[in-house]
Amino acid sequence: MKNKKHLLLFVLGMLMLPGLLKAQGIGKPVLFNAAWSFHKGDISTGISGIASETQWRTVDLPHDWSIEGPFSDEWASATGYLPGGIGWYKKSFAGNAAWKAKQVYIYFDGVYKNSEVWINGHYLGKRPNGFIAFQYELTRYLNLTGKNTIAVRVDHSEFADSRWYTGSGIYRNVYLIVKDPVHIAPWDVAFTTPDISLEKATVKAKVSVTNSNKVDASVLVKVNLLDEKGKAAIALQKQIKAKPGVHEVEFEKELSSPKLWDTEKPELYKLQVSLSRNGKAFDEVTQSVGIRGIRFDKDKGFFLNGKSTKLKGVCIHDDAGALGVAVPQEVWVRRLKLLKDAGVNSLRLSHNPHADYLYDLCDKMGFLVMDEAFDEWEVGKNKWVAGWNVGTPSKNGYHEYFKEWADRDVADMVLRARNHPSIIMWSIGNEIDYPNDPYTHEVLNTGRNPQIYGKGYLPDHPPASGLTPIAKQLVKAVKAVDQTRPVTAALAGVVMSNEVGYPDVLDVVGYNYQEYRYPEDHKKYPNRIIYGSENGMQKQAWNAVDSNEYISAQYLWTGIDYLGEAGKWPQRSNGAGLIDLAGFKKPEYFFRQSLWSDKPMAYIGARPITGTDDKGIWSHRTAEPVWNWQSGSKVKVDCFTNCQETELFLNGKSLGKQISGAARGQVPSWQVDYEPGELVVKGYNNGIEVCTNNIKTAGDAYQLKTVADNILFNHNTKGLSQIEIYITDKNGNPVFTATDEIIVTVNGAAKLLGLESGSNSSHESYQSNKRKALHGRLLAYVQTTGKPGVVQVQFGAGNLKSSTITLTVK
């Protein structure tokens, strides 16, 4: 039966592929994700043994085998106590006689890691870096009239090779690309807007035309810039004679009354570049682009389109809890909407290039992006195995390949993403100068060093002087392909780096957790542009940005909880985020919203009077939305708000108004004698009520309530429904303390991708259809297959009243 299923999938793939390629358009990438075969473990005979190996299962890409677990303390805390290992993938597809005069490529957006690729048994190459996109040409080895087989070996046997969870496998999209021998490669269009204003903008496009033939080619190159209605704002063309090799063509035009891209209104154009001969187009590259101007100033901060702008940023990693790093685009849409609502306008993609679609989303949704290349250079950092800063660390990691691959990897990062208007900085490294991990300097025996491994100068460690020449090398590699954005790095050991000139190599200098250095270094290094590249949640850290004109940015660690960088077992995730692994908001989210959002808001949460917040860099506020306490308890109620005044009511009785600006830490608070019922806060601006928030005393857990972000889907495409599940009492009040196990059953043409509670220490299998709730909540990811019909998703939990969500695929 299993073999029949594989045969059916292969036949369908053989039949559908030519049509898909035709439908996608000339020379455009076609998703190549469906119906791969996966084998966990190595194949002793290598590529020659893939046909005889029987232990294969069908998977659709993207795929992350590490998230399948199980969690175990035999693995590393740094990477979430999840396994690495070796895996093989293969996919068979039909050739096409129409490809006879074409060039065929396979493009991988990311494979973690040490991927090796074969086509029909012929070796194509290896890419060690698991975060970099790459492609291989298949043409010469293809069978155009029969079966072809792609095979990929992935080696993540060094499982403790990162300071966070990376996943394992072909965890991003794969594309098949069919091109004419004369063509434009995927990254060979550069779009820039060197001069912009409200009245006009200079638009430039540089197109690299590859001629793989042995004779000159006469080609018409067209560049169209289309507005949102599809009308050509710019239409240019040049007739060229392309010699064998790569021929560059440049276009420039002044555009009147441009629609500028910014964070509030991210206006996008469509750049359409085509090649034609004899009046017929034979290759085309289409990308969304934006017209915007950026500028950093040493005294005035950051400017977007000439307007002073504070970068209210968060750092993010790739994973999404239950899904590992094989994350559908819809998950990031939901997450980014939440961050946008909190007032976030910038993202630091830590500490590696991210999935291709994430940059598209940032363009569409108006996020400014720092794209980052590396977390280590030529010497390995500590990757903790038994818990953060516990025991003996692993030293495995990217440094093993840095000398050979670094220049190419950082250049490819830039080439891949350089046309995205959202990107405003290229970062060549994160905390490469972390004191004593690995670099050291005598200055560590003096001064204040908030982040340091070991005590003082460690002479057996590599000297910090080694940082500067490598930084110069990487900056040169970036600027060789893009000079329109500044090059930066996130510095952890500024006092050490200052001694060896590392910051002087950078255009803008990021400081991690060193706000206290801003005034002194601004004075000592008057030409240095300083910003906060990684920061804690404390109010004073934001004050250092808000009150200093020359500091343009803060990037919180972190926007979202993430797998790995964990403490001792059983903790397997990091809880530093504003939202948890399931995308549920934490109290800290609302505090940040009170600082960063302009939309009137107020949030109330309660906690015992004893204890204080803001104890450390990553400390979170503990004001939970709970009004269930012992009778007679004295409870502290905190309000996070951006309103001028707030008033608290308990069961309709006012407990008094407070002026937000006069409250300690700008957080109005009340000490309340608990009584069950309803607690309400009202926010006022200029004496007018503008918002309200409430919490109620909850009764016993009684029922499940479900909310889906999407219930209607198109056929022939996969769709994702993200379903929030809440345990409530009879009256619909959330029961925050409920931890009931919830079982999910899917009936119809869909499957359960995973369940996520947001717990940082649960070892329940992510492959199961049941999971315990956390804070009375759970998130279900249900993916439709594209087959028309109705899908019933049922939710049950013991004696609790169940719930059903109906999904419809038209």
Image (cartoon, grey):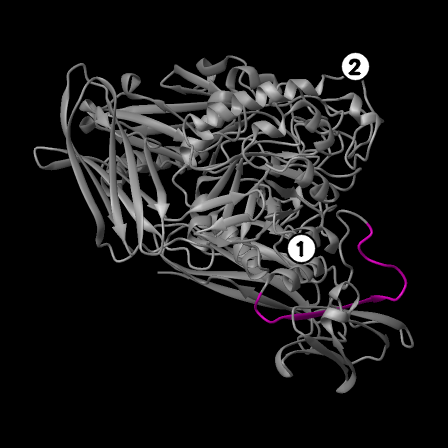
x, y percent for residue 154: 52, 24
Residue stretch in magenta: 598-615
Q: Nearer the viewer, residue 320 or 791?
A: 320
Whether residue 701 is visible: no
Would residue 643 be seen by someone viewing this image from the given angle? yes
On the image, the x and y values in percent for residue 42 come to: 56, 20
Query: Relative to 531, is 705 above or below?
Result: below
The secondary element bearing badge 2 is classed as: loop
Q: Percent from the top left, x then y, of residue 677?
A: 78, 81
> Sequence order check: which comes first, mark 1 or mark 2?
2
The answer to which of 37 and 182 lies nearer the viewer is: 182
Picture residue at 59% right of the left edge, 41% below the top: 317
Residue 460: assigned label: 2
Label 1 residue SS: loop
**Circle 1 crowding by C-alpha within 10 Å: few under 14, some 14–19, many from 20:** few
Q: Amino acid at mark 1?
A: Ser
Quadrant that contains the N terminus: top left
Q: Relative to residue 238, is residue 535 drawn left or right?
A: right
Residue 113, by quadrant, is top right
Q: Is residue 481 above or below residue 534?
A: above
The residue sitting at the bottom extreme is: 653
The residue under label 1 is 547
